[in-house]
């Protein structure tokens, strides 16, 4: 096919559950491509000599490589090409914010629509599942050394996966009754079906990884105790699970629940109806997931307050589109200033209108309140979803150095903390970020742990990732 012909193919779009159908349940909203659509989309790829998409991918997957195999109908080979770098492709293909990563970098996006890389990656995974192919990598011979992993999110999962496949025995300690971190207790099932996460864990267990739930390291077991029990290194991937507060009057009234706390309870199976009128505060993925979950658990009117405009919303365009289709209204340029209540329960939210003021170097403008523009909204529940901080291990007798954002300070290449046998990665180091970035750090930490256990230089031949200028707010 000539480049001109490739350029003439329009981007293919997946089919989706209809909004009125999907808000009654947690079924997956987006359907995968069929063979014909996937090949057509794959034919849009220009196979760039210096593929920008690969740099845009936090794990640096060989995207042109798997797309080339896909369009040659070598679906199984395509899957394994992707798997060379990505230990959780089923997860990444569904939840990565592709428009800010690989697809955001795709050269075709400069004059039109980028290649639908996420959907192509998902096609390969779904094809393997549908055709009952073996998706397990062969396990390595045991090396007789063991490593403890604290936290079962994508950082911990990836670290365990890499170590187990290098022959090290890993035990994952997880404080919750479920495994998967925010993939399970944050992201709702209509975006990431639970059998996908379960399959990733089956792959870990297959290579001897032990998973121990309901144990909080630093509480039921000290981190130093792990060392005494023979774990020669520890990886800390505890994420960022502490909801940031609005810091306004009335935040402790009944009816106020913070975003990740609400999602955790629903995702762990609690039946929670917030009442007919729900207000969510924030503009990121968490706020959108809260709003869409509230609809699915029986609330009638859900709307979001966001202090900037649609253009600045950190959530992905697809998520914003789904939100609007499902009937959630977003009140832009508005922020809550006080929560009013009666008898200890919230009744109304006092808000203020904002305007955009000075912009920073990245072009992001500061929201400024407009004097005397206050207005009231009646609500049964308000869910602030404005970001998360790291909830540190309680009573940890080993003090690890922390950054000014209260995240773990690590060596930027090796992920080693201030204590030589403890490594850290994911949201606990980066602040709230993405599954792929967490997975990448888990993988880098695994490489360092292997070198540490083998007495090799941790840094030799490795370079740091280019610095990001992205804002911390999510
Ligand atoms: C609602 C929501 C939606 C999101 N949507 C997306 C998305 O669409 N795409 C995307 O890429 N990313 C998304 N993210 C972000 C993504 O989920 C995280 O960046 C990623 O999960 C971080 O991985 P992690 O392994 O660092 O931490 P986590 O996934 O947070 O896992 C940490 C684990 O450690 C456990 N833990 C904590 N303390 C201890 C302790 N002391 N002892 C034992 N266990 C402990 C926790 O219970 C948790 O299971 C979303 C996040 C949320 C909250």
Image (cartoon, rainbow, N blue to C red):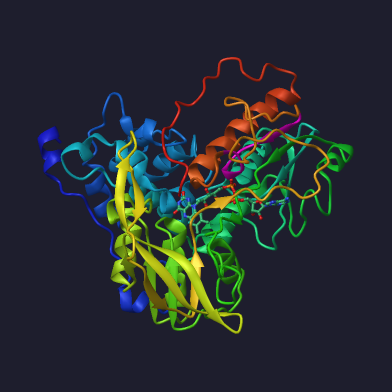
Residue 263 visible, this angle:
yes
Could you say where residue 169 lies in the image, as x and y percent from the top left?
A: 75, 39
Could you say where residue 441 lies in the image, as x and y percent from the top left?
A: 57, 36
User: Is 434 situated above or below 293?
Assistant: above
Tell me which residue sits at (55%, 39%) in the image. Answer: 430
Tally of marks: 0
- In magenta segment, residue 319: no
- Return the residue nearer the eye: 439 or 238: 238
User: Is 236 situated above or below 246?
Assistant: above
Residue 125 visible, this angle:
no
Tell me which residue sits at (30%, 67%) in the image. Answer: 324
402 relative position to 440: left or right: right
- Return the residue nearer the eye: 181 or 373: 373
Which residue, as the protein is rendered here, is positioned at the far right? 228
User: Is 459 situated above or below 56?
Assistant: above
Could you say where residue 279 lies in the image, as x and y percent from the top left?
A: 43, 72
108 relative position to 379: left or right: left
122 relative position to 185: left or right: left
- Return the residue nearer the eye: 265 or 310: 310
Looking at the rendering, in which quadrant would you find the N terminus? Answer: top left
Could you say where residue 85 lies in the image, as x and y percent from the top left?
A: 49, 35
Location of residue 253 by image quarter = bottom right
183 relative position to 170: left or right: left
Tell me which residue sits at (69%, 23%) in the image. Answer: 451
Location of residue 216 by image quarter = bottom right
> Which residues are the magenta region?
421-429
């Amino acid at each position: 096919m000539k480049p001109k012909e490739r350029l003439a193919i329009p981007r293919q779009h997946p089919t989706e559950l209809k909004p009125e159908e999907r808000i009654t349940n947690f079924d997956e909203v987006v359907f995968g491509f069929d063979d014909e659509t996937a090949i057509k989309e794959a034919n849009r790829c220009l196979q760039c000599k210096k593929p920008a998409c690969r740099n845009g991918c936090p794990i640096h997957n060989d995207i042109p490589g798997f797309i080339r195999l896909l369009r040659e109908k070598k679906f199984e080979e395509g899957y394994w090409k992707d798997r060379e770098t990505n230990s959780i492709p089923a997860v990444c293909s569904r939840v990565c914010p592709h428009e800010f990563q690989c697809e955001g970098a795709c050269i075709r996006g400069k004059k039109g629509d980028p290649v639908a890389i996420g959907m192509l990656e998902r096609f390969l995974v779904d094809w393997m599942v549908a055709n009952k192919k073996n998706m397990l990598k062969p396990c390595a011979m045991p090396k007789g050394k063991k490593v403890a992993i604290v936290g079962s999110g994508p950082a911990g999962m990836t670290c365990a996966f890499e170590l187990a496949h290098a022959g090290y025995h890993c035990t994952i300690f997880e404080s919750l009754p479920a495994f998967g971190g925010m993939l399970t207790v944050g992201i709702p099932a209509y975006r990431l079906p639970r059998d996908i996460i379960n399959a990733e864990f089956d792959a870990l267990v297959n290579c001897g990884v032990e998973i121990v739930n309901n144990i909080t390291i630093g509480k039921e077991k000290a981190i130093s105790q792990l060392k005494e029990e023979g774990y020669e290194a520890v990886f800390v991937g505890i994420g960022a699970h502490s909801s940031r507060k609005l810091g306004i009057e009335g935040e402790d009234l009944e009816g106020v629940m913070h975003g990740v706390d609400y999602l955790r309870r629903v995702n762990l199976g609690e039946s929670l109806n917030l009442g007919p009128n729900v207000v969510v505060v924030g503009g990121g993925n968490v706020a959108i997931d809260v709003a869409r979950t509230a609809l699915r658990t029986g609330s009638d009117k859900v709307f979001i307050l966001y202090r900037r405009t649609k253009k600045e919303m950190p959530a992905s365009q697809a998520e914003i589109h789904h939100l609007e289709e499902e009937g959630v209204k977003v009140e832009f340029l508005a922020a809550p200033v006080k929560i009013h209540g009666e008898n200890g329960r919230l009744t109304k939210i006092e808000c203020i209108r904002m305007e955009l003021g000075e912009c920073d170097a990245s072009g992001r403008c500061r929201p400024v309140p407009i004097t005397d523009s206050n207005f009231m909204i009646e609500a049964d529940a308000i869910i602030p979803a404005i970001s998360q901080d790291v909830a540190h291990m309680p009573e940890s007798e080993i003090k690890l150095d922390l950054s000014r954002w209260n995240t773990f300070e690590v060596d930027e290449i090796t992920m080693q903390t201030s204590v030589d046998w403890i490594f850290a990665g994911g949201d606990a180091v980066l602040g709230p970020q993405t599954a792929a970035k967490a997975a990448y750090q888990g993988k880098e930490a695994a490489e360092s742990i292997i070198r540490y256990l083998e007495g090799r230089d941790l840094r030799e031949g490795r370079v740091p990732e280019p610095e990001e200028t992205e804002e911390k707010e999510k």
